[in-house]
Image (tube, grey):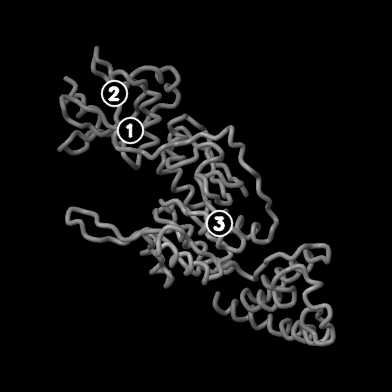
Amino acid sequence: MKHIKTLNHILAQPIIRLIRLYQLTLSPDESIFFLFLRGRVCAHHPHCSKYSIQVLKRYGFRPGIWYAFDRVLHCTPSMTIKHDPAHYRTIFCSSAPIGVPFLNDLTKDKRFEVIGVVTQPDKPSGRGMEMHENIIKTEAKKLGIKNIQTPNKLNPEKSEEGKEFADRLKDQHADFLVVIAYGKILPQAILDIPHIGPINVHWSKLPNYRGASPIQSSFLNGDTETAVTIMYMDAGMDTGDIIDTLPIKIPFSRTTKNIIEAFQQQWPHFLCETLRKTGKWYLGRTPQDHNKATLCAKIEKEDGEINPYTDTLESIYRKYRAFYLRPKIYFFHEGKRIVVEQLDLDENLYTENQNKPLLSKENLLLNKCVKTILIKPEGKKSMDRDSFKNGYLK
């Protein structure tokens, strides 16, 4: 692969020399013979010949020559001037594990240069309450990213720290600010900094499920499909204009864990392609219909509590799938907290049993729709259905 890249860049050199000759003699933006045309012909910044040299140097002959031709074909005198760099300087803003594969893909993709990472400050955790750095900070270090910022205050109009943070971002001359599960609201003064725009990745088909728990809300409402939405950010909560949306099916047996894994495997590539198309001005922006918006709240530990004797199997299974990772579903039996770690249902029997409870007080049997259940009583090891029935439901 290294040999191919070297050959690719060697092949680009003659083309670069020809473009430089063109710049000296015929270019309306570079030649000394056409000074009166400078800045009046090419509709992009940087102008086409300079852009062509940059892409050939960065990507080599094959990708570079394609990018150069594509630029020239889209450049006409009738166009207004547009910022169109050879690659996109990107600041990545995230604080959650789900952001890791996106950071990795952006770093590997030569169309982008991750010039900085913004994440939450180190926090105490564990029994000893020792300070631990955010997973995004750890990953950024592994990738060799040196510009890592962990501000406590963000608003330049309300604190000196916020002003210094904003000034540092401005000095980086970013094209994109990409935000994925950062955990803090960015003020408009920060969102206005990138040349092309602040971009957010949201885990629902907006305007549905704005807020903190869109994936869980899809399960709680029994949806059979969710999506990832890429949008421009504004000062509101997930209210910005939509750039593009990519759906994903939710099969009967899948949980939040499965959906997040699918997001992590498939959607980083979708983000990179969407950013590229946005930077090239190929994609427009669609305002959201705010009248159709729904909000979802932050998930709390007590949201996972169920009553297996009165709640329907449908409501329990929805909670199980939604809260599989956190906080998990649980109930109390004789004052002890019982966690349901695994709940597999027979899809063919589900319809006729979904309105029945998980447990019956009359015969103390589990719903016949249940194929597999793994239960962990407080202070005990996990056990299967027979062990639970024999030990707790006699």
| Gap in angstroms between the C-alphas marked 2 and 1 | 12 Å
| Left or right of 53, for residue 309 | left
* Quadrant in which residue 48 is drawn: bottom right
Q: Nearer the viewer, residue 346 or 83?
A: 83
Name which residue lies at 84% across and 83% down: 34
In this view, the residue farthest toward the top is 362
Under circle 2, the secondary element is loop
Assess disc 1: are there few (<14), some (14-19) or many (≥20) residues with their C-alpha within 10 Å of its C-alpha. some
Under circle 1, the secondary element is helix
Return the disc, 1 or 3, that comes first in the chain's sequence.
3
Image: 49 above or below 390: below
Q: Which mark is residue 108?
A: none
Residue receiving disc 3: 198
Name which residue lies at 77% across and 75% down: 39
Q: How far across and how far down the image is residue 111, in percent? A: 59, 67
- Identify residue type, mark 2: Asn
Return the disc, 3 or 2, that comes first in the chain's sequence.
3
Residue receiving disc 1: 303
Q: Which mark is residue 307?
A: 2
Depth check, mark 2 against mark 1: the one in front is 1
Q: Nearer the viewer, residue 352 or 333?
A: 333
Under circle 3, the secondary element is strand
- Identify residue type, mark 3: Pro
